[in-house]
Image: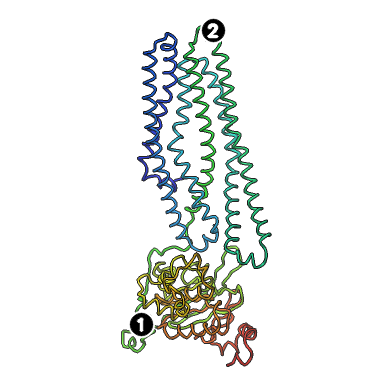
């Protein structure tokens, strides 16, 4: 709860002012039945019209004041609840953005979207009701009972007898509906998962003619949500009618007993009218309370889900004492060795430090599951182009994901420029690495805006050079609006190869120290792929490049090839060496190349 209350602190004034003015409105409302009783007994009975007009004017004034108090409370509630919701959403978004891939995989995208929208909306409603009704409804109920006791204590005993019955009803409803609300929220996550998969995979679904099957799957998920909603709805729906039954039974008892008192002369007509008005106020207050119970039961489930997100801490954390080597100096050594050779010995020593080093690294996506990488040890020198190849699930993408610390290794160390990646400031580490992921991801905007992600202050010339290196300049120049061409959501208006080339341009424009191409040319034809590799070789200027690919032709010219199999290194070396020394590599080559092409 403390994680949530911090977002209410800026609205302390509204949290105080709103209930106070609502309390004033409730006090005015409680006085009205007594004024009505006085009007009946002293004005209408004796035919004193002047008294009736005075009391009527007083009632009108009280109504206007009550309306003004209500408006102040409504404004305070709206200001506080909307502000609270906005701040909480922003904080959740920042927190979710700080989580590592491991935590994001655990929650799942549909669930996180539900929590930041639906659950926050539920909490926002609860805050509004907290200010508007949480004080007013109980105060009206208790105040009406007190006022009725002042009018006639014996009649008020009927109301006091009804209170335990109502409390038992509330307990019964809450104890049964609260677990169902939690299940309902979880099943909403499930339907969001199905919907997300259907919308993102609509082309695949249509290609395999699975629309009917997916429709049945969605209907099943929706029916599951509906069944839970009906169960909780049936329980919640009982609260208002049962409350009305208890209060109306109390009214009948009061009317029966009140008639006896009036006949005996112990109670006036005005007093019985006021008494019935107080009972009606109690009824309305209890109905509001019953609705509040439902709202806060839902909010309690949402609160647990929001707190679960806010309580999650990233397994990839910033180091307490960051240690960053002189990256620019070591890169200069790789690019200008002759110049650097004349400098002091420490600089020459720094030049020999590998750009990337895996030292007995093991990693698994689940602490209890199978290892995706097992005891990996390899060094990658500065300026090298290194190819990673292996079968599906061999650990290639996992290997490169450990370098920018998307995940942390279970054991061993991953070092960049001789420093454990865990000791780098995350921003510094990731700014020095350009990544082209397996799945080309573009954002709504323009082509130019997407390329600028790699370097926000890039000039137009730099953008065009990056596009040329990525072999994207050709298709961009053919577009009517060129670099200003709009990119739709996810780049749906571009082909797979065009999206891949734009993501490559986005990565290379910042001239990173390390460039990771994670199977980023799978949608490119062989000629474009070859042209891309030539352009990268010509412009990389000491940049260390890791190329993950299923194609032998893409990695065969690399300075070093790392062959992975079942999370282990099966071989390291140049193409010619691996043909003789690595059976796994020979099998890959024989499946893609003829014997003449393999040795050419």
The mark tally for this picture is 2
Q: Which numbered disc, 1 or 2, marks the residue closer to the eye?
A: 2
Q: Nearer the viewer, residue 121 or 346?
A: 121
Q: Work out which residue is located at the far top of the displayed protein and give it.
A: 264
Q: What mark, if any, has residue 263 been given in the picture?
A: 2
Q: Is residue 466 left or right of residue 575?
A: left
- Mark 1 lies on residue: 332
Q: Is residue 321 left or right of residue 204?
A: left
Q: Please tell me which residue is depicted at 61% across the width and 74% down the height of the picture.
A: 392
What is the quadrant of residue 537 in the picture?
bottom left
Residue 127, compared with residue 260, is above or below; it is below
Residue 219, compared with residue 128, is above or below; it is below
Residue 280 shows up from this direction: yes
Crowding at mark 2 (Cα within 10 Å: few <14, some 14-19, many 20+) = few
Q: Is residue 343 left or right of residue 432?
A: left
- Of the image marks 1 and 2, the number of the one nearer the N terminus: 2
Secondary structure state at the residue bearing disc 2: helix
Residue 195 location in percent, x, y? 59, 57
């Amino acid at each position: 709860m403390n994680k949530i209350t911090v977002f209410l602190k800026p609205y302390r004034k509204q949290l105080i002012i709103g209930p106070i003015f609502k309390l004033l409105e409730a006090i005015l409302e409680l006085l009205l039945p007594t004024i009505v009783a006085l009007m009946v007994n002293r004005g209408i009975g004796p035919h004193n019209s002047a008294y009736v007009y005075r009391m009527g004017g007083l009632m009108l004034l009280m109504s206007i004041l009550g309306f003004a108090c209500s408006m102040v409370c409504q404004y305070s509630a709206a200001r506080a609840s909307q502000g609270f919701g906005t701040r909480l959403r922003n904080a959740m978004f920042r927190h979710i953005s700080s989580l590592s891939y491991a935590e994001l995989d655990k929650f799942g995208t549909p669930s996180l979207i539900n929590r930041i929208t639906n659950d926050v909306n539920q909490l926002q409603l609860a805050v509004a009701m907290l200010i508007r009704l949480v004080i007013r409804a109980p105060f009206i109920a208790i105040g009406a009972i007190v006022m009725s006791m002042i009018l006639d204590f014996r009649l008020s005993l009927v109301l006091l007898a009804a209170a335990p019955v109502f409390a038992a009803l509330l307990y019964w409803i809450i104890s049964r509906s609260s677990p169902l609300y939690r299940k309902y929220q979880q099943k909403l996550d499930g339907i969001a998962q199905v919907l997300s998969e259907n919308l993102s995979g609509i082309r695949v679904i249509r290609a395999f003619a699975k629309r009917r099957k997916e429709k049945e799957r969605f209907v099943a998920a929706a029916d599951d949500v509906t069944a839970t909603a009906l169960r909780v709805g049936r329980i919640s729906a009982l609260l208002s009618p049962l409350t009305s039954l208890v209060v109306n039974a109390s009214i009948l008892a009061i009317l029966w007993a009140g008639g006896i008192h009036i006949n005996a002369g112990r109670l006036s007509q005005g007093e019985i009218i006021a008494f019935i008005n107080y009972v009606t106020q109690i009824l309305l207050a209890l109905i509001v309370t019953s609705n509040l119970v439902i709202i806060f039961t839902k909010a309690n489930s949402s609160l647990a889900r929001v707190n679960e997100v806010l309580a999650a801490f990233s397994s990839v954390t910033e180091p307490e004492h960051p240690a960053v080597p002189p990256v620019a100096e070591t890169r200069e050594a790789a690019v200008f060795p002759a110049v650097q050779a004349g400098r002091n010995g420490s600089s020459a020593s720094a030049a020999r430090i590998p750009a990337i080093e895996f030292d007995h690294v093991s990693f698994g996506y689940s602490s209890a599951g199978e290892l995706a990488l097992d005891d990996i040890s390899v060094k990658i020198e500065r300026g090298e182009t290194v190819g990673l190849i292996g079968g599906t699930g061999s650990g290639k993408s996992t290997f490169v994901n450990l370098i920018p610390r998307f995940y942390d290794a279970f054991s061993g160390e991953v070092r960049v420029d001789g420093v454990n990646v865990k000791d780098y400031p995350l921003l510094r580490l990731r700014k020095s690495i350009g990544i082209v992921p397996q799945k080309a991801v573009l954002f709504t905007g323009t082509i130019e805006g997407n390329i600028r992600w790699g370097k926000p202050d890039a000039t137009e010339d730099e953008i065009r050079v990056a596009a040329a290196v990525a072999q994207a300049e050709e298709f961009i120049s053919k577009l009517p609006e060129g670099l200003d061409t709009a990119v739709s959501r996810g780049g749906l208006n571009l082909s797979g190869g065009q999206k891949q080339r734009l993501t490559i341009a986005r990565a290379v424009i910042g001239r990173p120290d390390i460039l990771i191409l994670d199977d980023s040319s799978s949608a490119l034809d062989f000629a474009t792929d070859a042209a891309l590799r030539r352009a990268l070789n010509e412009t990389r200027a000491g940049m260390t490049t890791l190329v993950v690919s299923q194609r032998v032709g893409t990695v065969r010219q690399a300075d070093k090839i790392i062959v992975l199999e079942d999370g282990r290194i099966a071989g390291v070396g140049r193409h010619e060496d691996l043909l003789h020394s690595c059976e796994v590599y020979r099998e890959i080559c024989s499946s893609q190349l003829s014997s003449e092409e393999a040795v050419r």
